[in-house]
Amino acid sequence: MIEGVVVTPLRKIPDERGMIMHMMRADAPHFEKFGEIYFAVSYPGVIKAWYRHARQIQNYAVISGMIKLVFYDPREDSPTRDTVQQLFIGEDNYCLVRIPTDIYSGYKTYGVKPAILANCTTEPHDST
Ligand SMILES: Cc1cn([C@H]2C[C@H](O)[C@@H](COP(=O)(O)OP(=O)(O)O[C@H]3O[C@H](C)C(=O)[C@H](O)[C@H]3O)O2)c(=O)[nH]c1=O
C-alpha cells in the first residue's frame, strides 16, 4: 500500500425501501477536514488521469458502478517511492479511499454502466 493511501470499508444498510450508504462523518476516525464534496460521473470505458494535488487530500467513494483506480508514488521522501498500486472499487467493493497529496492517481470506469464517484476533499476545488 502506498504511504498515506488508506482504504476504509463502508457500510451499506439495506431495507425494503432501498439503502443508506455511509461515506463520511465528522466523528469518524478517517475524517480530517471538509473542503468540498462533488460527484464525478464517468461513462463506461472512460479513463481519467493523471491527477496530482499539492494541498488537497481526496476521499473517493464510488456509489454506483465500478472503477479501476491506480496510483503512482513519485515522492522523494516516501518509503513507497516509485510504487504503483491498483484498486478495484465501487458498488461491489464499497469503501472510502484516502488519497494523500503529491501522488499521481487515475482511474478507468469498467462494466456496463456509468460510475458515480463521490469525492470529499479537504480543500475546495481550485483549477488554477
Ligand atoms: C472538481 C470541480 C470541477 N469544476 C469544473 C472545472 C472544469 O470546468 C469541469 C471539469 O473539471 P475537471 O476536469 O477537474 O474534472 P475531472 O477530470 O473529473 O477531475 C475532478 O474529479 C476527479 C474525481 C478528481 O479527483 C480531480 O481532482 C478533479 O479535478 O468542472 C468545478 O467547477 N468545480 C469542481 O469542484
Image (cartoon, helix red, strand yellow):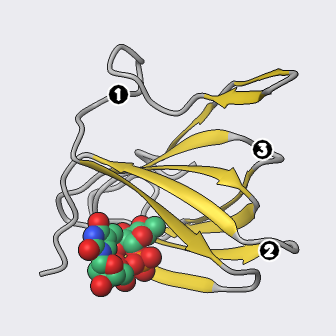
The answer to whether residue 1 is above or below residue 74 is: above
Residue 89 relative to residue 124: left or right: right
Q: Where's the C terminus, which quadrant?
A: bottom left
Q: Quadrant of ligand 1?
A: bottom left
Amino acid, disc 1: Phe
For label 2, the crowd category at 10 Å Cα-Cα, with few meaning under 14, some 14 to 19 and many 20 or more, is some
Q: Earlier in the sequence, mark 1 or mark 3?
A: 1
Q: Secondary structure at mark 2?
A: strand
Q: CA distance from mark 1 to mark 2?
A: 28 Å
Numbered label attached to residue 93: 3
Contact between marks 1 and 2 (CB within 8 A): the answer is: no
Question: Does the closest atom of ligand 1 sit within 8 Å of the Cβ of label 1?
Answer: no
Of residues 39 and 47, the one drawn nearer to the viewer in this rendering: 39
Where is residue 81 drawn, in percent x and y? 42, 64
Determine which residue is flagged by label 2.
Answer: 110
| Amino acid residing under circle 2 | Tyr
